[in-house]
């Protein structure tokens, strides 16, 4: 039986085998290969979080922007026009907008298209190590010069 006094005093050097690295890896080698150590760019397998979170998020974003944008504009305008009464007066616009989103969320070809886009973005990140900038960030920084200074638009 080992003496726990060493652990209480912080003297771990006397028991090197208790805390030695046994060669176990935290991450799979599949996730640490590649040109910059971020994974193999040509690997097309998806992790559970990518299937259940990342790809559905991309499907929602793309359907809002590209497939249901007119219905979203109509719903947003109804909300602006009716202020506090929007809960009651904009139900039909909201229903149509939600139906559109659900239709594209369950459309297999569209989901596969989004999956391919995700895999392309992930491969690019794994090759370069540079995250793809969001459209929001691009719009916010559209007045930036290459050297980082702001362009005066006034």
Image (cartoon, rainbow, N blue to C red):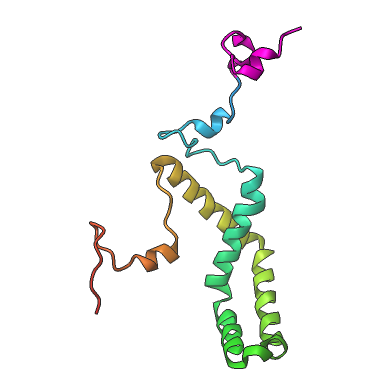
In the foreground, 13 or 97? 13
Magenta residues, dominant SS class: loop
The residues colored magenta run 1-23
Report the side of 36 relative to 5 (left or right): left
Q: Quadrant of the C terminus?
A: bottom left
Residue 82 in the image: above or below residue 49: below
Q: Is residue 55 magenta?
A: no
Q: Is residue 17 magenta?
A: yes
Residue 119 point in image, percent of width and height? 52, 48
Q: Residue at x 64, y 13 (%)?
A: 6
Residue 127 point in image, percent of width and height? 41, 40
Q: Quadrant of the N terminus?
A: top right
Residue 7 point in image, percent of width and height? 65, 17
In the foreground, 102 or 133? 133
Residue 89 in the image: above or below residue 69: below
Q: Residue at x 56, y 65 (%)?
A: 61
Q: Residue at x 29, y 68 (%)?
A: 143
Q: Residue at x 60, y 40 (%)?
A: 45
Residue 17 in the image: above or below residue 59: above
- Image quadrant in which you'd find residue 129: top left
- Image quadrant in which you'd find residue 57: bottom right
Tag count? 0
Residue 149 point in image, percent of width and height? 24, 62
Report the side of 140 relative to 56 (left or right): left
Residue 69 in the image: above or below residue 90: above
């Amino acid at each position: 039986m080992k003496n726990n006094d060493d652990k209480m005093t912080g003297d771990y050097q006397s028991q090197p085998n208790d805390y030695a690295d046994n060669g176990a890896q935290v991450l799979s080698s599949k996730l640490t290969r590649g040109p910059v150590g971020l994974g193999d760019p040509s690997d097309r397998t998806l992790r559970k979080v990518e299937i259940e979170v990342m790809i559905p998020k991309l499907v929602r974003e793309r359907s809002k922007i590209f497939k249901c944008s007119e219905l979203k504009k109509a719903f947003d305008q109804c909300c602006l026009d009716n202020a506090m009464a929007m809960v009651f007066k904009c139900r039909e616009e909201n229903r149509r907008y939600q139906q559109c989103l659900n239709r594209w969320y369950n459309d297999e070809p569209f989901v596969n298209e989004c999956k391919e886009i995700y895999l392309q973005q992930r491969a690019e990140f794994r090759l370069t190590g540079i995250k793809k900038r969001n459209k929001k960030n691009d719009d916010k920084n559209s007045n930036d010069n290459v050297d980082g200074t702001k362009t005066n638009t006034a």
